Amino acid sequence: MEKMFCYQCQENAGNKGCQKIGVCGKKPETANLQDVLVYSLKGIAYLVNQAKKNNMDIKDANLFTLESLFMTITNANFDDDRFVDTINESVKLRNDIKAKLESNNIDFDNSLDIINFEAGTKEELYKKSESDLIGVLATKDEDKRSLRELVTYGLKGLAAYYVHASNLDKNNEEIFEFVNRALASLIDDSLSVDDLVSLTLETGKFGVDTMALLDEANTSKYGNPEITKVNIGVRNNPAILISGHDLNDLEMLLEQTKGTGVDVYTHSEMLPAHYYPAFKKYDNFVGNYGNAWWKQREEFKTFNGPILFTTNCIVPPTDDLIRQRIFTTGSAGFPNCKHIIEKDGKKDFSEIIKLAKELDSPTEIETGEIVGGFAHAQVFALADKVIEAVKSGAIKKFFVMAGCDGRMKSRDYYTQFANELPKDTVILTAGCAKYRYNKLNLGDIGGIPRVLDAGQCNDSYSLAVIALKLKEVFELEDVNELPIAYNIAWYEQKAVIVLLALLYLGVKNIHLGPTLPAFLSPNVANVLVENFGIQGITNVEEDLKIFLG
Ligand code: SF4
Ligand code: SF3
């Protein structure tokens, strides 16, 4: 298979789209199967929505839809067999739903391919993916395509956060209903560009709701994140490295490793797990190993032990020995890496623990500590100090530098930007973008660290809650009157939902880098510039002048 088209992430080829193979390593076959899956999910949503319009609730596919969308996020799953199974499951679910609609005399257009195509083998589905009806380029109008993809990527990000919340038994029917309505809208040719702009903002609203749901799920189960020093060195025990974003998986791993003599370290986006009170009771939960996702090839080499991916970002392993140490679970997957499935709400990690015991302990690559845990409750606990520092002028401005990290050289910008910010400024961060500056020792302002890490990318919600609280405390009309500037780094689709959420909350003048999304057509980009003041980045010197006025 030679053709593909994907431009969903920041590193897409030439900021035009990956057309031969993904810069991320995704093969055309995998990209095309992902397109078939998303196509099938839209078909299901169309049916569910038709039922809804006739006052009939069909819930059969709700969680399946979100879990499937999650699988198509950048760097989550590279396993064609899993996509084939999931597409075939979607066809079965779809046919069941169709039968229900028919038996209730509910009207739908049964001539549509999107609800009629058949399940198949890998080869048959590869063939199916060549249809002009499937994939990004199926929408010919450039602006509608841009908005449809913007909403799709927002929904993928939302799906990821939803699934984490759902894994902790928090669910919300309104979010399901919106996802079905939004997916069905994406195949409705009667919708205008203006309708799609409204849908984009509504996606942001449900992004806020989903992040709030996940925040509630995490904090009600594991407590509120608190200021924590995280060790970045190692101990001399066999160990497992856990990556991704799923705290439920982490809890199961800690439960199963306690007392076994096997240590657990976090990698990349799992670092903020150390900030939760509930995980502090595990004395084998040692620290964080390494940096952001894209450094994993070299860091996995020296880690020596097994690695468990609970979500993205996987970098395709080139070394067979390292591949044998990689396990996946949940939405994550990679061909020939063992995938651990859930049975009755439990996952059995004994094979990973056994392997850890046979392998060397991690080789030290760093020593020391990093500080984090500044989610909303912790910042509110420090509110008096923060407000006083703002009033006295000790803190002149906050810079939200949340988002993702990535391998592009141009991201050195963020290290330089953090380094050159005046000493009376504070960085608010979340997501793996922090690795560009969280080890720089930028000091503190009267005891308040100059880098306040709220947590994972989904904890960007915390930063919004903090901003809204400050607006209230300072009795301001508009959140944009606060001394907060936004210089956000994006990479994959969770950053898209975070962005849409911020726009929905009325945040203006966000700078987005290192490049603006390739999926924004010139007209759609203009709408974002004119209505929200979205801007790109240039160089540190020029941007600092703009930000500091
Ligand atoms: Fe390219 Fe990004 Fe799509 Fe991978 S996810 S194929 S790098 S656009
Ligand atoms: Fe990072 Fe993938 Fe986005 Fe969760 S791990 S922020 S890039």
Image (tube, rainbow, N blue to C red):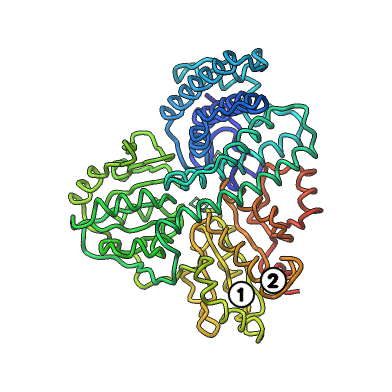
Image quadrant in which the C terminus is located: bottom right
Q: What secondary structure is marked by label 2?
A: helix
View quadrant of ligand 1: top right
Q: Residues within 10 Å of mark 1 (few under 14, many from 20)?
A: few
Q: Residues within 10 Å of mark 2 (few under 14, many from 20)?
A: some
CA distance separating discs 1 and 2: 8 Å
For the point 56% across and 22% down, the residue is 129
Query: In the displayed structure, does residue 68 sit left or right of residue 283?
Result: right
**Ligand 2 closer than 8 Å to the CB at disc 2?**
no
- Decide which of 357, 44 is in the foreground and name it: 44
Query: Compared to 535, does 306 lie above or below?
Result: above
In the rendered image, is residue 339 in sight? no
**Residue beneath disc 1:** 420
x and y, in percent, of residue 298 in the image: 38, 54
For the point 55% across and 67% down, the residue is 415
Which amino acid type is shown beneath numbered disc 2? Leu
Label 1 vs 2, first from the N-terminus: 1
Query: In the displayed structure, does residue 343 sit left or right of residue 142?
Result: left
**Residue beneath disc 2:** 544
